[in-house]
Structures are given as C-alpha cells and as structure tokens.
Amino acid sequence: MSYELLSELYNLKYPYEVPALKYKYNALEPYIDEATMMLHHDKHHKAYVDNLNKALEKYPELQAKTLKELLSNIEKIPQEVREAIRNNGGGHFNHSFFWQVMAPNKGGEAKGELKNKIDKTYGSFDKFKEQFKKAALERFGSGWAWLVKDQQGNLKIISTANQDTPLALGVKPIIAIDVWEHAYYLKYQNKRAEYIDNWWNVVDWDRAETLANS
C-alpha cells in the first residue's frame, strides 16, 4: 500500500498491514543502508503490525475504529490492551509516516510556503535544522523528533518517547526522524548525531510541503 495523503494513514483500520516502500531498500544509500532498511521495515515494523492485530483480535468495537481514533483517545482503550495498542499502534503509525517523508535524490531545503514558515518561525532553515537536531539528540533512549503544525497553523518541533505519536497532542506531523537505535545502529553504531546529519539528505521536502498544506 502506498500512502499518498496523510488522511489515508489516519483512516487505516484493522487488520493492519505493513505498507510497501515506494523505493528500493538500497535507494537511500549511502545515508541509510540497505541492511538497516530491510531489518527496520520487514522485521521491526512488521512486529508492531502483528502485535497490534493480535491485541485487537478480541475487540471488534476497537477494530471498527481508525488508527487515528485509537491513538488520539488512548485513555479510552480498555486497560488490558491499552499499552499494547499505544506501543504497537504508535509504532505502526510512526513508521508508516517515516517511510513517506524519505525518498532518494531528495534532501536540500524545504520549499514553498513551508520554507517561508520555517524561516519566519526559526529565523533561517539552518537554525531550524539545529533545533530539530537538538530535539533528536536530547531524546533520552528511544523515540522520535518531529516537525508538526498545531491547530493554529504554527510550526513546532517536538520529541516523543518510545512509539508515542503526535496524534494525542492534536497536531499534524510534517516530518519525523526515528532515533531508536534500530534505525541507525548497523551503520552508525552509537553516532546518533552523524545519522541525523546524514538523514537530511533523504528528507522528501515535496512530500513535507504537501503534508503541511493538507
């Protein structure tokens, strides 16, 4: 499945599937290596999907809800499956989004209205990158860094722990970087900063611009 719009990702329902990549496993080299992409997509992401489907097997009322509905109202999920859905549903959403905002032969700077908003909010694109990197580096342990748009249309850089998502915060994701060690350890070992610096070379700013204005 190829997610062309964020709304499609929001509206996913049980049974969940791992989306096919829109590029080859080695397409993001040398910045993200083929072995990492295969392990990350085929093993880690698949485990989240399998565990999410398993958690929902006996809950038809939850199966009827969209992924966004589940993750935006996690406190309403029955306690016995709440953490499983939070962790695995979050893992499915975060990774499905992550694959979308990367592509080969991309990188560079943001474009269009998104670039204007970044410059206005952070002073310059380079200053934005510095703050985003800081958020990604300072996430202790596993998690994510995001550029999001709030309900007033303002840009914010946030960081979430583990597989928590921005959905419960009522904000719209624009780009995200996975800073779990499984996202970079085969190539970069413990050098998270180097991984972040190289990741900018695969950010799909065309997709980000579309997401920012959708």
Image (spheres, helix red, strand yellow):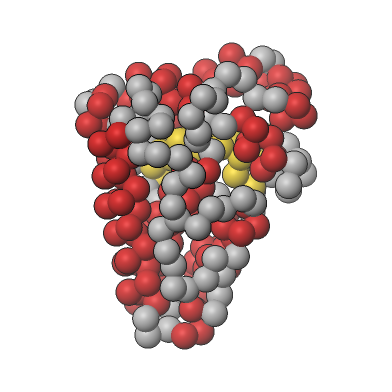
Q: Quadrant of residue 82?
A: bottom left
Residue 30 percent across, percent down from the top left: 35, 22
Residue displayed at 44% across by 52% down: 20
Q: Find the residue positioned furthest to the front.
A: 24
- Please tell me which residue lies in front, 59 or 26: 26
Above or below for 58 versus 101:
below
- Please tell me which residue lies in front, 52 or 153: 52
Horizontally, is 131 left or right of 116 in the view?
left
Above or below for 16 versus 177:
below
Residue displayed at 59% across by 14% down: 126
- Please tell me which residue lies in front, 82 or 117: 117
Above or below for 65 versus 127:
below
Residue displayed at 75% across by 26% down: 112
Residue 9 percent across, percent down from the top left: 57, 57
Residue displayed at 62% across by 38% down: 207
Horizontally, is 177 left or right of 49 in the view?
right
Q: Is residue 117 visible?
A: no
Residue 208 percent across, percent down from the top left: 63, 36
- Please tell me which residue lies in front, 171 or 188: 188
Q: Is residue 2 visible?
A: yes
Residue 146 percent across, percent down from the top left: 53, 37
Q: Quadrant of residue 188?
A: top left
Across the whole image, how many numbered discs are drawn on residues? 0
